[in-house]
Amino acid sequence: MTAPAPAPAHTTVGSQRASFARVLRAEWTKFRSVRGWVIGMIVAALLIVFVGVFLGANASIGCGPNLSGAACLPKIPIGPGGQAVNDSYYFVRRPLTGNGSITARVTSLTGYYANGNGTAQTAQGPPQANLAHGLVPWSKAGIIITASTRQGSAYVAMMVTGSHGVRMQWNYVNDTAGIPGAVTAASPRWLRLVLTRGTPAGTAAGRSDDTVTGYDSADGVHWSRVGTVQLTGLGATVQSGLFVTSPLASKVTPFFGGASTQESPSQATAVFDRVGLRGAWSSAPWTGDNLGRHWWSPSDGAGGYRLSDGRFTVTGSGDIAPIVGGPGSGGVPSTSISQPLVGVFAGLIAVVVIGAAFVTAEYRRGLIRLTLAASPRRGRVLAAKAIVVGSVAFVMGLMAAVLAVSLGLPRERAQGQYVMPTSTLTDVRVIVGTAALMAVAAAFAVGVGAIVRRSAMAIATVILAVVLPFLLAVTVLPLGAGEWLLRVTPAAGFAIQQSLPQYSQVDAAYPIGAGYYPLPPLAGFAVLCGFALLALCLATFLLRRRDA
């Protein structure tokens, strides 16, 4: 007798694929056959749009008896990297053409900040009664080389600060530490910037490889290099000299349910001497300018300088830093692409209900036996259910996110909110990530539903794990506790909506849910995916070991 030839391996693989495709088709048929589930997904999408657009953007900004909304939007400078920036300071400057360096010693940095509704003092004027002595932690005084006096220009600066020692900062978002400690007459700080011109880029408008190197010293003899920066866009002539600025004094008071922030103007005064210039400096005298003074923050740039016996006393206010959302934004009412998506939590509740019911309904009606009889490989059934409900949630979430952003951002802009600029890649990640968040939450609900087999328990479990921590973090818990929850629970997945970076050189509240989260976007999303995968694996294990 001749033994039959074994079937080719690819035939078995092909039949397995065909079998899983049939399971997928069967689960899709089940889903679309139940009108309540289809309507529920549509409701989830509508909730995202409604909450995000009509409830998340309902505060119109007023700036006068006859002005409101978009008419109140200030002109915000944009830095070389495309970020919205604060760029206001008092600048004592001279033009520099070609290679050159500037050296200065800082012997004193003092300041005032307003109490209550007070305003910052005028330059060299006596302290007002409503001002308190003290420096804001990021008060800055030092030397700077900048492409021009236009706000948003490329620059490099060496500076002393109120509480963060010597820093080298450039182009608003970059920061490197130098010598630590405060500046006093007994402990001065020497600062130096050296500009080295590169090969012209073909026109007089800019050079391709100009470099600026920053140094600091405690005694003017032993110098340390803090950093070297390559700048593009410098013209043939740059502006360089001494500057002083001081951002808003911010006091955050935490309480159960959030935190309150009180901001008030501040002003700093620095004393410079031993100012040395080398290279192709203009012979023009020193010029003092208030840069970046605006009607919405009249103290910005306010100050002046006095030169006596080679010693400069310079006073200024404002900041040279990126704008961040919420408190710390320099008084600018701001929002981001994440704000119109605040309604995702409401849509997730509907998706979770459907995801759990997609499994538990078959247990409640006894239909799970028929499903498993038709497809004995139980893991495939669970995988098919997760893929089907996750895919539908992704599509509905994507449509809702696009619609919410398309309708929400123009509405917020019309109401007087400044929309923080973000890159196209960030916008795509936030919108597609929102849809992925919906999909993974739906799959998580499928896994939990298969584990507990009861709708109410499954829905409550997933909502407690995904939605409730987010709501508590945003509206109830103090900042530290809220950040902890958004690191260790499935609610960490909301980080995929993060659109704004945090900056170490900007003290701000960085409000959760307004563009900021404690974990990076992909790391937070990975936490949610890990919980969903764990639930599906446990559900598969239990499904194989116990009776239907």
Image: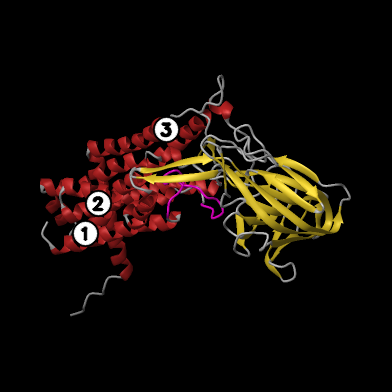
Using the rendered view, name the quadrant where residue 332 is placed.
top right
Give the residues drawn in magenta, as a range.
502-518
User: Mark 1 belongs to which amino acid?
Assistant: Ala
Q: Pinpoint residue 212: horizontal percent, then vertical percent.
A: 73, 60
**Is disc 2 placed on a helix, strand or loop?**
helix
Residue visible at 60% across and 45% down in the picture: 112
Which residue, given by chain and number where applicable, does mark 2 sit on? Answer: 446
Quarter containing the C terminus? bottom left
User: Mark 3 belongs to which amino acid?
Assistant: Val
Marks 2 and 1 sit apart, C-alpha to C-alpha, by: 9 Å
Q: Which mark is residue 539?
A: 1
Which residue in the rendered view is the most extreme toward the right? Answer: 283
Q: Which mark is residue 53?
A: 3
- Count how many numbered circles sit on residues in the image: 3
**Do the residues under discs 2 and 1 have CB atoms within 8 angstroms?**
yes
Q: Pinpoint residue 274: horizontal percent, then vertical percent.
A: 78, 59
User: Mark 2 belongs to which amino acid?
Assistant: Val
Marks 3 and 1 sit apart, C-alpha to C-alpha, by: 37 Å
Is residue 18 visible in the rendered image? The answer is yes
> In front of the other: label 3 or label 1?
3
**Is disc 1 placed on a helix, strand or loop?**
helix
Q: Above or below — where is 426 with respect to 76? A: below
Asked if the magenta segment contains residue 503, the reply would be: yes
Q: Above or below — where is 1 with respect to 343? A: below
The kind of secondary structure the magenta stretch mainly shows is loop
**Is disc 3 placed on a helix, strand or loop?**
helix
